[in-house]
Image: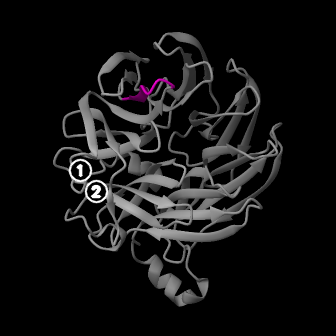
Amino acid sequence: MKLNILFFILLHGVISSCTAQTLLWSNFSFKGDFHAVAPLHDSTCVLVGGGDDWLLVRVDKTGAILWQKSMGTKGRDYALDVIVDKDGGFLVLGSWEHNFDPPYRASKSRLAKFDKNGELIWEQIYSKGIFCGLSKIYELKEKGYILAGLFNSGTNDLESRNYDAWIVRIDEHGKTLWEKTIGGSGTDKITDVVQLADGQLLLSGYSFIYDKEAEDEENGQVILAQLTLDGTLIGSKEIGGIGYEGAEKIVPSPDGGFLLFGTTDSPDFGKPKSRYDKEEEEEDNEDEWDEDLFVCKISKQLKIEWIKRYGGTNTDSFWDCVATKRGVVMLGYSTSRDGDFAKSAFNEYSVVFEINWNGKTKWVNTFDRATISGVYSIGKINEEYFILTGKNEKATGVFAFRKKGKRKK
């Protein structure tokens, strides 16, 4: 899957347009990858990831390590998501008994509850199909959580592409209350979940349909699905163009609607379809299209209001985001030297930028590969202070910046 394959591409980048006062501190002294970060209530942060084992680290507001733990099996195990609980502890979700390609395919998925000192309180194991990958955890207004990801419903063939989306509701101790699968003939995955005002669930993700004569995806669409709290599917829709796109994050907006974030390579996604007749579509399909980050605004009635793309003439991919009071700070990867990130002089780089709730870019910071080879996830300490996880050529790390990026002219 193209969007998952991006997980294995190092996002090349160091701070080039960040001013000295923007970068506060950095600590690159870890092995493996950090896939998620969660600020705790005392301005410290928990970082989770893995390589050979789950990697859990807590750092203070200066980046100093308060404690570090690893846990795993004989395979390669990855912590993929983390959320802070109301009692000050945190929950970590990830792959377990991992014997296949990292990080999503595993024999089982594992959810573990820890206190703020990293002591294990309880754990639960989940499995479905020949291998599975729960990678998103969301805390409900009611007691309990939603876990989401995918599983492979094949029987013997580990190369089977029959992935379906898998959603599990659990109680506050991790016990399964119900589970739901959504899928067709290709690959379907739920990547994010939010709860609506009426208590129902809105899920986002992607669906890929494969070309039987080729190894890559033929077409991919954004998935939106609405479920009741008892797991009943109310409805679903697909949003897309003639290429592929997939939503990775969904963020509630102040007007009661939502912003979907992801990556697209469809030339007609977010553009009038009248620009493309059948002959032009066939010509477009012969070439590899340029990827862009996208934001899709959804109304509270779940109607599309607008779609905006960010990038240039080369590859630009979405990585992560976090909401602020005035908009959303986004992480991405780019090889474009024109377009929205044209101020960068580098061929390959990571980018951090903020948009307001209407999708207008407020500022952009870029990162070249001289000291940081990738930026993976972002957490918010407050409206001005952010924690990012990344990597250099030798180790995994974490760094902090204050929101003082360059203004777009």
Q: Is residue 393 above or below residue 366?
A: above
Q: What's the residue at 78%, 46% (across, down)? A: 197
- The image quarter containing residue 87 is top right
- The image quarter containing residue 212 is bottom right
Q: Is residue 53 visible?
A: no
Q: Left or right: where does residue 337 sit relative to residue 237?
A: left
Give coordinates of residue 68: x percent, y percent. 35, 17
> In which quadrant is the C terminus drawn?
bottom left
- The image quarter containing residue 310 is bottom left
Circle 2 sits on which residue?
A: 366
Q: Residues within 10 Å of mark 1 (few under 14, many from 20)?
A: many
Residue 44 lies in magenta, yes or no? yes
Gap between marks 2 and 1, in whole Å?
6 Å
Q: Amino acid at mark 1?
A: Ile
Q: Left or right: where does residue 181 sit relative to residue 60?
A: right
Asked if the residue under mark 1 is in contact with the one under mark 2, i.e. CB atoms within 8 Å, the reply is yes
Residue 39 lies in magenta, yes or no? no
Q: Provide the residue span drawn in magenta.
A: 41-50
Give coordinates of residue 34: x percent, y percent. 38, 34
Q: Is residue 379 above or below residue 269?
A: above
Q: Is residue 44 above or below residue 304?
A: above
Q: Is residue 109 above or below residue 3?
A: above
Circle 1 sits on which residue?
A: 15
Q: Secondary structure at mark 1?
A: loop
How is colour applied across the structure in the image?
one colour
Q: Left or right: where does residue 373 sit relative to residue 179?
A: left
**Of residues 207 and 234, which is closer to you in this image?**
234
Q: What's the residue at 41%, 29% (across, down)? A: 47
Prevailing secondary structure of the magenta residues:
strand
Q: Secondary structure at mark 2?
A: strand
Q: Residues within 10 Å of mark 2 (few under 14, many from 20)?
A: many
